[in-house]
Image (tube, rainbow, N blue to C red):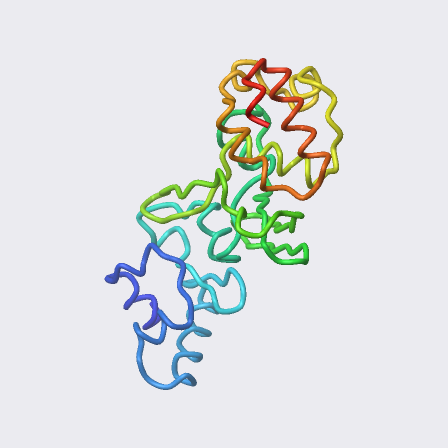
């Protein structure tokens, strides 16, 4: 077993995603020495690289399973999980989603393929400054944190990204297969909280039509 692996097995970092700073704190010594130790652990299959500068122990050395949402957060720390990924997590759509899709405050769409963990994509949206994390919650997964859109935020992010025009509740139920019970849990407060988030008028139209279709207080929008 490699020296780096042995050290990690008896350290709290064992369950975490490691960056270069944590490796330096753990191993000490020169950067050349740390590079050599890291490289040998990678070649031995005792360490896995998620992307340049981020590493994890393979599952056989871990006591907990690393959740993909936690990985998504570390790959792009200022992002949050949304779109169909969040809708599936909340139980709003029945289909399994294999790509972890997130919203980013950046300007470019990015993607990373992490061996053993799948595909991670990051998409910018036209959002008003200061409203990026409205109806986005911090959740704990195996003791580690991730940011996840609430169901309505994820749905509107989806509509914004796909430039999807409003087509009524029947469209949401038939095409996305969202149950009426889920839609009925949307409140006027939920809609009010989101009315300043999006720059696109089409999404503002979604909020207004949702309010009407669900027979919520007209003052919500």
Residue 87 percent across, percent down from the top left:
55, 31
Instruction: Write down the quadrant of residue 35 in the picture.
Output: bottom left
Tally of marks: 0
Instruction: Write down the quadrant of residue 115 in the picture.
Output: bottom right
Left or right of 75 on screen, residue 155: right
Looking at the image, is 152 positioned above or below residue 66? above
Q: Nearer the viewer, residue 214 or 161?
A: 214
Residue plotted at (39% across, 83% down): 33
Residue 136 percent across, percent down from the top left:
47, 41
Looking at the image, is 16 positioned above or below residue 168? below
Left or right of 199 on screen, residue 8: left
Instruction: Write down the quadrant of residue 19 in the picture.
Output: bottom left
Residue plotted at (55% across, 30% down): 152
Looking at the image, is 85 positioned above or below residue 66? above
Q: Quadrant of the N terminus?
A: bottom left
Residue plotted at (48% across, 27% down): 189
List the single residue furthest toward the left. Answer: 10
List the single residue furthest toward the front. Answer: 219
Residue 3 percent across, percent down from the top left:
32, 73
Q: Quadrant of the C terminus?
A: top right
Q: Nearer the viewer, residue 23 or 84?
A: 84
Residue plotted at (54% across, 24% down): 92
Residue 122 percent across, percent down from the top left:
61, 51
Q: Nearer the viewer, residue 82 or 198?
A: 198
């Amino acid at each position: 077993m490699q020296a780096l692996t042995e050290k990690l097995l008896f350290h709290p970092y064992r369950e975490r995603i490691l960056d270069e700073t944590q490796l330096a704190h753990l191993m000490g010594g020169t950067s050349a020495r740390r590079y050599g130790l890291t490289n040998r652990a990678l070649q031995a299959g005792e360490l896995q690289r998620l992307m340049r500068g981020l590493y994890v122990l393979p599952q056989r050395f871990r006591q907990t399973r690393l959740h993909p949402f936690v990985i998504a957060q570390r790959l792009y720390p200022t992002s949050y999980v949304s779109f169909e990924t969040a809708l599936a997590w909340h139980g709003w759509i029945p289909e399994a989603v294999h790509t972890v899709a997130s919203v980013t405050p950046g300007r470019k769409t990015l993607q990373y393929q992490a061996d053993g963990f799948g595909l991670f994509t990051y998409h910018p949206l036209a959002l008003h400054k200061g409203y990026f994390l409205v109806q986005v919650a911090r959740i704990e997964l195996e003791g580690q944190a991730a940011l996840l859109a609430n169901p309505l935020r994820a749905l509107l992010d989806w509509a914004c990204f796909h430039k999807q025009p409003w087509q009524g509740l029947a469209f949401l139920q038939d095409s996305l297969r969202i149950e009426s019970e889920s839609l009925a849990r949307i409140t006027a407060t939920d809609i009010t909280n989101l009315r300043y988030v999006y720059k696109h008028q089409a999404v503002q139209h979604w909020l207004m039509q949702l309010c009407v279709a669900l027979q919520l207080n007209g003052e919500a929008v």
